[in-house]
Amino acid sequence: MRKLVTKLILFFLPLIVFAVGVEIVVENIPNSYSYKSNYMTSHAADIKTLVLGSSNAYDGICPYELPNCFNLANSGQALEDDYRLLSMYIDSMDSLKMVILPLGYHSLLSSQTMPRRLYYTVYMHLYSRWPLSQYSFEAYDMQNALRKIKEYILTGDITRCDSLGQRLYYEGTVDENGKRDMQIDFLSHHDSFEITKKRDVIDSCANYLHLIDSICQRYNVRLVIVQMPVLSQYKAQLPVEQIMIQDSLLRSFTPSAIYINASEWPLSSKDCYNATHISDATSISFTKELYEYIIRLTH
Amino acid sequence: MAFNSLTFAFFLPVVFAVYWQLQGHLRWQNAFVVLASYVFYGWWDWRFLGLIVFSSLLTWGTGLLIANALRTQNNKLAKLWFIGTITINLGILCIFKYYDFFVSSLCTLLQIDATKHLLHLVLPVGISFYTFQGISYSVDVYRRNILPTNNLLTFCAFLTFFPQLVAGPIERATNLLPQFDSPRRFHYQEAVEGLRRILWGLFKKVVIADTCATFINPVWDTYSHQPASALILAALLFSIQIYGDFSGYSDIAIGTARLFGIKLRENFRTPYFSRDVAEFWQRWHISLNTWFVDYVYIPLGGSRNGKARTISNTFVVFLLSGLWHGAEWSFVGWGLYHALLFMILLITNRTHRYRNEVATYTQIPQIVLTFILLTMGWILFRAPDIETAWEFVYSMCNSTIFSIPQGIHFTRLVCLLMCIFAMVFFEWRNRTKNEAPIPHSFIVYYVIVFAIWWFSGRASSDFIYFQF
C-alpha cells in the first residue's frame, strides 16, 4: 500500500502545484466581481442608490444618471444573489435611499446559475467554499482559468465594468454580415415558460423578491422594481399568461415598493444590443427618464 | 456525492486509507463500508437514508424468515414472507417513482383534473437500483439459490456498497455477499487496475459525455428552430453521451470497488460494436438485463412455450425495462421500439447469431446500421415526451439536412470528435477484455488527467442514470 500511496503522491504532486499556482494567479487578476466587491467594501457608506439585477440591469441602468449610484448588477445574477448581496451590504450602506431592481421576463425563472456561483463564492464571498466543489476554485475550470491569464497578459485588464459598475464593451451577437443580431426568436423561446411546469422556480424567485422587499422596508429604503424595456417583437412572442402573471406578481409589491412597467418603453433595434438588452447610449436616456418618473411618483 | 465531484476526490482517499487500516478486522471493515456508504448517499439528501435503512432491515429480516420457514418445510409461510417483502419493496418504489405518472395518466384518460391527486414526491437517488438488488436477494433466498446471511452488517454492506449504490451495476447476492463475508487483503496490482478503470471512466464521463451534452442540450432546447443537420448531429452525439455517461459511471464504480478488494460484475461490453439489437442487449446495462431475464422473462416461461409466448414475454420485459428507466410514456415507447427490433430477430431466429463471437472489420457496416437504429431509439429516451420525439424525428427529415448548423463551436467539436475517436480506437483494440483499455504509461495517464481537467470546467453535470 505504501508503494501505491508514494506513486500516487509523486504522480499528483506536479498537478497540485500547477493547480495551486494557477489558482493564486487567477484569483489575483482584477475582474468585475472583485472590483464590485472591493468598491462595496470601501464605498458602501456613500451609496444612495443601489442597482441590483441581471444583465439587462448591468447594461440598461446608467449609474451616472442617478444620485450616488452604484450598479451592482451582473450577468446571470439571480434574485437569490441579489438578496444575498443586499443582506451582506445593507448594514454598511448608511446613506442608502433607494434600491432599483430591474427585471426581465426571464427573471422569475432565474434560479441561481451554477457556473456563476464560483464568482460569487471566490470574489464576493456570498457562499462558502465548503463543501468543496467545482465552484470553490477557479483552477477547477482550467480552460477558463488559462484563458483569463492569457487575456490579462495580452490586454492588462479583464474587468468588464466601468467605475460605477455598468458593463463596458457588450456588443451582443453579430451575424455573418457583421450586423447586430437581435436574437428575437432565440430569446423569446429561451425566456418563455409554462407557468404550471415552473411553479417551484417562480415561487422561489417570488420568495426572494419578498425578502428583498422586507429588507428595504426594515431599513426604510425605497425599493423600485422595474420591468425593463424590450423589443415589442420579442414581447409579442412570449406567452400572454406569463406576462400577466409576472405583472400581477410585481404589482403585488406595491405600495411598499414602487413598480414601474417599462416593458413598452419605445425601442427600436438600433437602441439595443439584442431584444432584451438596451445599449449603452440608450441606457442614459432610459435611466434619466426612469429617475424623473420615480421623482414624480414619490413627490 | 457524484464520482465526478471534487468532494468525491477527497472522500475516496480518506475512505480508502481508513478501510485498509482496518485490514484483518472484517467486521470493522464492513461496518466502515456501511458508514462510508451512508455518508456518500446522505450527501445528496440525508432524509432518504431512512428509506435505505428500512429497505435493508426489511430485506435482511424477511430473508431470514423465508429461510427459516423453508427449513421447517412451511412453504406457505415462506411464500407469505416472500410476497410481503416484494410487495413492500416494490410498493415503495412505485409510490416514489410511478404514483404521479399513473395517477396523471388515469386522470387524463378520465378527463379529470390531476393536480390535487398528485404527490410531487422527490425521487430518491438510486432507488430503482437498490430496490432491484434487494428483490434479487429475496428471490434468490426463496428459490434456495443462496443461504441468507445472519450478519446484518454484511447484508447492509452488500445492499449499500457506495460505488454501486446509486447507479449500479445491480449486484447479485451470489457474487457480492461472499466477498463481504471473507477477509480482504490489499493487492497492489488490483488497486492499480482499479485506478486505471476509474481514470478511463472519468475520461468517458467528463471528456466525452459532458462535452457531448454541451452540443446536445442547446439543440434540444430549441429543436424547432434548428436545421435537420443539427438535429442529426445531436441525435448521434446523444448515443455517444449516454454510453460515455453510463458506462463511464460503471467503470468508476467497478474501479472504486477494486480499490477496496471487491469485484463487481461487468455492466457494459463495448455495446456499440454490436452487430444487431439482440447482441446489443447482451452488452448494454448487463446487470439490469440479466435481472429481467432471471426474474421476469424466465419465470414467465422464457422461450420454452412456443414463439408466440416468447414474443409476448419479450414484449413484457422490454416494456418493464422501459418503465424502469422512468415514469414517462417516452420510456415506454423506447422499450417498445426495442421490443419491435428484437421481435424481427426473434421471428427470423437470429437472436443468438453473435453470441460469444467478437466483431471483425468486415462487420463494420452491420455495426453502423445497428448504431443508427439505436440512435433512433435514443431520441425517444432523450425526449421529454413522445410528441416531442416525433417532432424531433420529423424535423430531421427535411432539406436543411445539408446546411451547416449555426452556433456550433467547431474547434470544440473537432476536439470532441478526436476524443471520441480515441475512445472507439482503444475500446475496439481491447474489445475482448474487461479492463481499462488504455496503455500502461504515465504519459498516457497525464494526458488523460489533463484532458479531464481541461474539459471538466463548469459544464460537468450529474450522471444521467441518477434520475432512474
Image (cartoon, coloured by chain):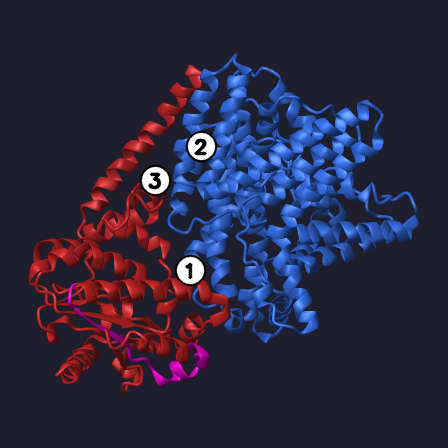
Secondary structure, mark 1, is loop
Colour given to chain B in the rendered image: blue
The magenta span reads: A219-242
**Corner quadrant of residue A155:** bottom left
The answer to whether marks 1 and 3 mark residues whose Cβ atoms lie closer than 8 Å is no
Disc 3 marks which residue?
Answer: A132
**Corner quadrant of residue B426:** top right
- Most extreme residue toward the right is B306
Q: Is residue A78 above or below residue B19?
A: below
Q: Which mark is nearer the camera, 1 or 3? A: 3
Residue at 93% from the left image edge and 48% from the top image edge: B306
- Most extreme residue toward the top is B24
Residue B331: x percent and y percent? 66, 57
Colour given to chain A in the rendered image: red
Disc 1 marks which residue?
Answer: B409
Considering depth in this image, is B267 or A241 the residue closer to the camera?
A241
Residue A128: x percent and y percent? 28, 44
Quarter of the figure that contains the N terminus of chain B: top left
Q: Measure the alpha-carbon separation of dots 2 and 3.
A: 24 Å
Disc 2 marks which residue?
Answer: B445
- The residue under label 1 is which amino acid type? His
Q: Is residue B76 found left or right of B128 in the rendered image? A: right
Whether discs 1 and 3 lie on one chain: the answer is: no
